[in-house]
């Protein structure tokens, strides 16, 4: 039995708990500082409540951090210094220095670490990556991604809208696409970005970013917290031999309508669920002593591209993302 402990029982903590509960070889623990949320979490998931984050870390084999991004460093380092495997929601941290501290500490301690770059596990994005890698569209030349929906206003203390804590749309949301594009098209050479949040550092945000790659390919990434029509993702990759495209709004899927909310149910089989596959991949890597499916360095590089985009949006200059830490 693998003992997994979630710290932070908010939006993502609840998503993760649902999937760990489907794993018969996992015993679930959690720590949530808000008593009302902790009660609801326990009632929903039947997990064992720890009295503190430190007690949870001591009692578990794997710690899953689902805390606001500005708390990742503190609790990540506590987990690593206790010698426990660490799954960290994306982005790894607020700054490159903090993220590098976590990645280097995990490497020195020999502790498994995986960032929650879950887009690699979405079936359509995974297939897009595979098709590019196997040469289905020839040499990739240009890509476009779009991700977003309404502003996330339900975070504890409204932390997403304080960009000093969340990083705004470029760090919190576009980091998914920066990771997927780097995974699919290789290292990013330069970044140029325009964003609303880089100037306000608060509130709903929107950003347009252009990337150039070492390979000569180019891409643009649109990320928004200003789309009231619901969450949507899309991508397109054009190459010398064809094009691949995906739009979550035009894919046939099961939709439900409850209390005025219309929702696409996404993957219908457990085996298709990106969050299940991401977390299962990490638990099995820890159990078998094999490398996690996504490395700490991948999380660091996704953040590096995001921070280069923020710097570019603030300065109006083209910025080269840092690669060495
Ligand atoms: N991969 C994805 O698709 C995805 C989606 C949303 C958010 N995220 C990431 O997940 C992380 C968490 O986001 P969220 O949406 O769950 O935020 P949230 O605000 O809904 O949840 C955070 C929870 O942590 C609790 N908390 C705060 N400080 C604590 C402490 N010291 N000890 C214990 N609990 C504490 C809060 O009370 C809250 O319940 C962020 O890094 C975010 O960027 C990832």
Image (cartoon, grey):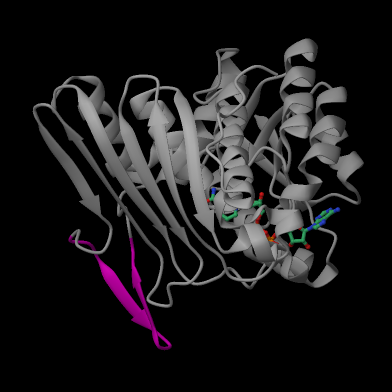
Outermost residue to the left:
241
Figure quadrant, ligand 1: bottom right
Q: Is residue 251 visible?
A: yes
Q: 307 or 33, which lies in front?
A: 307
Question: Going by the image, does 275 lie left or right of 79?
Answer: left
- Position of residue 301 relative to residue 48, above or below, is above
| Quadrant position of residue 161 | bottom right
Per the rendered image, the range of residues in magenta is 252-265
Task: Tally the numbered discs.
Answer: 0
Q: 148 or 263, which lies in front?
A: 148
Image quarter hosting the C terminus? top right
- Residue 257 appears at what percent x and percent y? 34, 81
- Position of residue 104 relative to residue 25, above or below, is above
- Residue 183 appears at what percent x and percent y? 41, 27
| Quadrant position of residue 40 | bottom right
Q: 18 or 293, which lies in front?
A: 293
Residue under the image location 40 percent in, 72 percent down? 230
Image quarter hosting the N terminus? top right
- Residue 43 appears at what percent x and percent y? 69, 66
Question: Going by the image, does 311 lie left or right of 215?
Answer: right
Q: Is residue 157 magenta?
A: no
Residue under the image location 40 percent in, 88 percent down? 260
Q: Is residue 261 magenta?
A: yes
Residue under the image location 75 percent in, 18 percent down? 104
Outermost residue to the bottom:
260
Q: 199 or 7, which lies in front?
A: 199
Question: Going by the image, does 224 lie left or right of 136?
Answer: right
- Residue 115 appears at what percent x and percent y? 60, 34
Q: Is residue 90 visible?
A: no
């Amino acid at each position: 039995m693998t003992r997994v402990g979630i710290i932070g029982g908010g939006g993502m903590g609840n998503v993760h708990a649902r999937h760990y509960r489907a794993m018969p070889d996992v015993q679930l623990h959690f720590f949530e500082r808000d008593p009302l949320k902790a009660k609801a979490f326990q009632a929903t998931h039947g997990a064992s409540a720890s009295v503190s984050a430190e007690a949870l870390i001591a009692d578990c084999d794997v710690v899953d951090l689902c805390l606001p991004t500005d708390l990742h460093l503190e609790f990540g380092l506590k987990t690593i210094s206790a010698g426990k495997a660490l799954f960290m929601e994306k982005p790894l941290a607020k700054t490159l220095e903090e993220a590098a501290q976590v990645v280097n500490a995990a490497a020195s301690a020999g502790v498994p670490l995986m960032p929650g770059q879950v887009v690699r596990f979405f079936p359509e994005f995974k297939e897009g990556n595979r098709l590019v890698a196997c040469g289905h569209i020839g040499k990739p030349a240009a890509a476009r991604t779009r991700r977003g929906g309404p502003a996330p206003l339900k975070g504890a203390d409204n932390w997403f809208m304080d960009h000093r804590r969340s990083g705004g749309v470029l760090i919190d949301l576009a980091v998914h696409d920066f990771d997927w594009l780097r995974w699919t098209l290789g290292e990013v050479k330069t970044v140029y970005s325009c964003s609303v949040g880089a100037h306000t550092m608060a509130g709903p945000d929107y950003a347009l970013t252009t990337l150039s790659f070492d390979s000569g390919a180019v891409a643009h990434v649109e990320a928004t917290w200003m789309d009231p029509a619901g969450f949507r993702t899309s991508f397109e990759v054009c190459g010398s031999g064809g094009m691949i495209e995906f739009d979550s709004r035009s894919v046939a899927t099961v939709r439900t309508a409850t209390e005025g909310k219309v929702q696409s149910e996404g993957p219908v089989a457990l085996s298709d669920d990106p969050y299940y596959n991401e977390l299962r991949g990490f638990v099995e890597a820890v159990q078998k002593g094999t490398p996690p499916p996504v490395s700490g360095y991948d999380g660091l590089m996704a953040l590096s591209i995001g921070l280069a985009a923020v710097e570019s949006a603030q300065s109006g200059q083209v910025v080269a993302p840092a690669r060495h830490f």
